[in-house]
Image: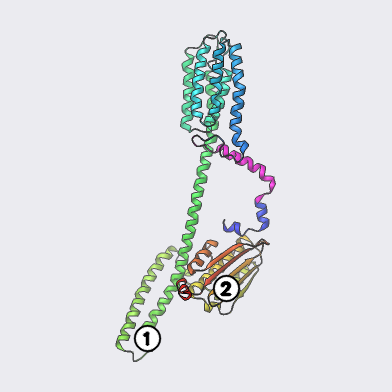
Amino acid sequence: MSDRARFRSPSAQAAATGGAATRTPRSLGQFAVALRTPARAAEPLFAQAPRMWQRMLPYAVAAVCVVTLLPVTIVVLTTAYVAGGGWAGALGVAQTVPLLLAVTRPLPAWALMLCADVVGAVVLTQADRVAGHAWPWTPMAIIGYLVLMVCLGLRESIRTLIGVWLVTGAAGVVLGFFHPPEVINTVALLFVLSGVVLALTGALRGLGDARQKIAEQESISETERARRTLLEERARIARELHDVVAHHMSVITVQADSAPYRLPGMAEPVREEFTAIAASARESLGEMRRLLTVLRGDEANGRDLAPQPGLGKLQQLVEATVRAGQPVELSLAAGAAEAAPPAVDLSAYRIVQEALANVVRHAPGAPTRVSVTYDADEVLVLVVNGPARDAVVALETSGTGHGLVGMRERVRLTGGTLDTGPMPDGGFRVAARLPLLPPNETDEEAS
């Protein structure tokens, strides 16, 4: 869930859901998506539909077509064309029953039906009353063939559809050389209608393919975006902590260089030891500066060169947020800034900063309470806001913009815990526990 969804007020959530009135259009939309979604091999049409009746719809349509076309085909062949009863029954079954197979395997069903239609055209050349009737494709054969084209168009690739269409036209052209006299030639009719049906259903399937690929790319992009956000936040934290470490290395260098002057009468071995410490610290400081240059990259500016903030700057942060129109109350325990080590001090400030930025973005106008307390073991940071009330100016001049991701990384860095979640009244809570001692030192003391 994104930060925006987590900090959304109850009224915004109700407006986003839309209520029960949108359930029916949503169901129809899901069915339309299932219609456009390509079916995999041996998978029935509409297999991805959300409801059972929608998944059974292709079987029902195929069964209705078979039950309707089978007796009509037999009656028309025996009465209008005066074909033999045995041939009429066999052709009726061969030209309609493959529609049941078309739901799951339309290409084999097309091969069977095309063969049956060609055989039927050859048989009808010997019928007694073929003159004046449709040939080589009877009206019932055309209807069944078009239904089959729908199944093919929703299932097969464009190359396969073009091949099916061309084979259909070629079969009609070959049969045209043997047509009986005075018949109504239906070769062009079936060729045109099948082409139109294949084009429409193929386009619908192509739209489904495109949407599916877009959804896959969006999923990949979302994953990459989350990963990039995490890496950016970790790099930012690393830059800030390297500033802290560089400051400590500078202090060590100065202390080691000035020790002979501050402590006169120092023995020569001790003086040499301090000189070696100063040289090592100076070398480490140089390496640290080069590493900072790599981490900052093009982002090195005046802001990055400024001292890192801490709990002592919380009052200024809260005042700036209040000036932006966000009601915020601060409760800061006396001595918290001095008790926290630099990493915890910086992490606590950034957590409050990100929490206030999220309140301004996602719950504008909500009354917010910031509390920072500490004891001998840890610093507790608590930010609680109520539901949104009105709009304010977003205060994001120095935040990372990564919200909960940045908070989790900073808490993980210090070995603490983070607890976030919605409140019963529609607000949101952020609670972070930051140990005052590094995790390894805490474990050693506990043992």
Question: SS for tag 1?
Answer: helix
- Picture layout, residue 309 above or below residue 34: below
Extreme-front residue of the structure: 447
**Residue 52 versus residue 107: which sits nearer the camera?**
52
Q: Residue at x 47, y 63 (%)?
A: 234
Image coordinates of residue 206 in percent, x first then y, are 52, 36
Please identify the quadrant where the N terminus is shown.
bottom right
- In the rendered structure, which segment of residues is drawn in magenta? 17-41
- Picture layout, residue 67 above or below residue 329: above
Q: Residue at x 31, y 89 (%)?
A: 267
List the residue tagged with mark 1: 259
Return the disc, 1 or 2, that comes first in the chain's sequence. Answer: 1
Image coordinates of residue 14 in percent, x first then y, are 67, 53
**Residue 197 versus residue 341: which sits nearer the camera?**
341
Would you say the magenta stretch is mainly helix, strand or loop? helix
At label 1, the amino acid type is Ala
- Left or right of 41? Residue 58 is right
Rendered image quadrant of residue 390: bottom right
**Residue 331 versus residue 144: which sits nearer the camera?**
144
Question: SS for tag 2?
Answer: helix
Numbered tag placed on residue 158 in the rendering: none
At label 2, the amino acid type is Leu
Q: CA distance from mark 1 to mark 2?
A: 36 Å
Asked if residue 40 lies in the magenta stretch, the reply is yes
List the residue tagged with mark 2: 314
CB of mark 1 within 8 Å of CB of mark 2?
no
- Left or right of 239? Residue 373 is right
Asked if residue 356 lies in the magenta stretch, the reply is no
Image coordinates of residue 184 in percent, x first then y, are 56, 13
Extreme-bottom residue of the structure: 265
Judge whether residue 295 can be spotted in this image.
Answer: yes
